Amino acid sequence: MRQRHASQDARRAREFEAFVAGAAGRLLHAATLLTAEPPDANPRARRLLTHALAHTYAYWDRLRGEDPYDRARQQLAVRFARGAWHAYGLARVPWIGRHGWGTSRTEPGGVLVRLTPQERLVLVLRMYEGVAEEQTAALLALSVERVRAITARATATLLRPPRGPATALPTVAPS
C-alpha cells in the first residue's frame, strides 16, 4: 500500500515536472507582461508564477482531463487581479497613480506599463494568450461588452505614443 502511494506520488511529480518544463517559460512571460516589469528583473512576476504553479500542483490529481495550462493561467490571472485590487484599491489617489505598484512611465518595463492593471490583464489574456472574449469575461466576472471596451481602450493607449516634453522653438535674433 505504502509502495503504491510512493509510486503514484513519483508519477505525479514527473508529470508535473514535464508540464512545468514545457509551460513555465510562456507563463513567466505572461506574468512579466502583467506586472510590466523588465524581463531580467521581474520578482513580482516570478512570485505570481510560483503561486500559480503551486496551486496547479495542489489540484493536479483533480484536473480530470482539464488542461493544466488553462488552470495555471487562470490562477495567474486571478492572483494578479486580486493583488491589483488590493494594491490599487485607491488607484485614484494621486501619489499611487493609475500605473500602480510604484511604476511610472519612465521606469523600464515596456509599453504595457502605460496601462492600468485591468487593461494589462485583459490585453494579455486576449492578445498574448489568445483567450476568447467570452472566456476572459467569465474569468474576470465582467460582461463581454466590458472586456471588448477595455481591450479597445488598452489597444488605443498602446497605439497612441505618449507625449514627450515640448521642444523649445529656436529664437530668431532681431534684425
Image (spheres, rainbow, N blue to C red):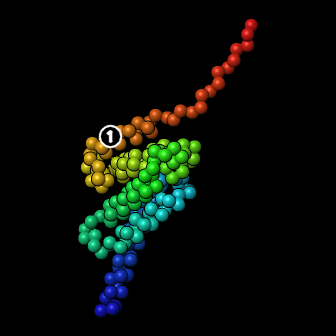
Which three-letter amino acid code belongs to the residue tagged 1? Answer: Ala
> In the rendering, at what x and y percent does residue 29 appear?
45, 56
> Is 64 left, or right, of 24 in this rendering?
left
Residue 42 picture location, percent across and down: 53, 58
Observer-nearest of 46 and 166: 166
Numbered-mark total: 1
Q: In the depicted view, which residue is nearer to us: 127 or 55?
A: 55
Q: Which residue is mark 1?
A: 149
Left/right of residue 104 with respect to residue 138 in the rendered view: right
In the picture, which quadrant includes the N terminus?
A: bottom left
Is residue 76 positioned above or below 121 on the image? below
Q: Residue at x 59, y 32 (%)?
A: 165
Looking at the image, which residue is at 45% across and 66% down? 50
Within-10-Å neighbours for mark 1: few <14, some 14–19, many 20+: few
Residue 61 in view here: yes
Q: Position of residue 47 (x, y in %)?
A: 48, 64
- Quadrant occupied by the C terminus: top right
Q: Residue at x 56, y 56 (%)?
A: 40
**Which quadrant of the structure image shows residue 4?**
bottom left
Q: Is residue 128 visible?
A: no
- Horizontal side of residue 94 vs 64, given as left or right: right
At 40% from the left and 67% from the top, the residue drawn is 53
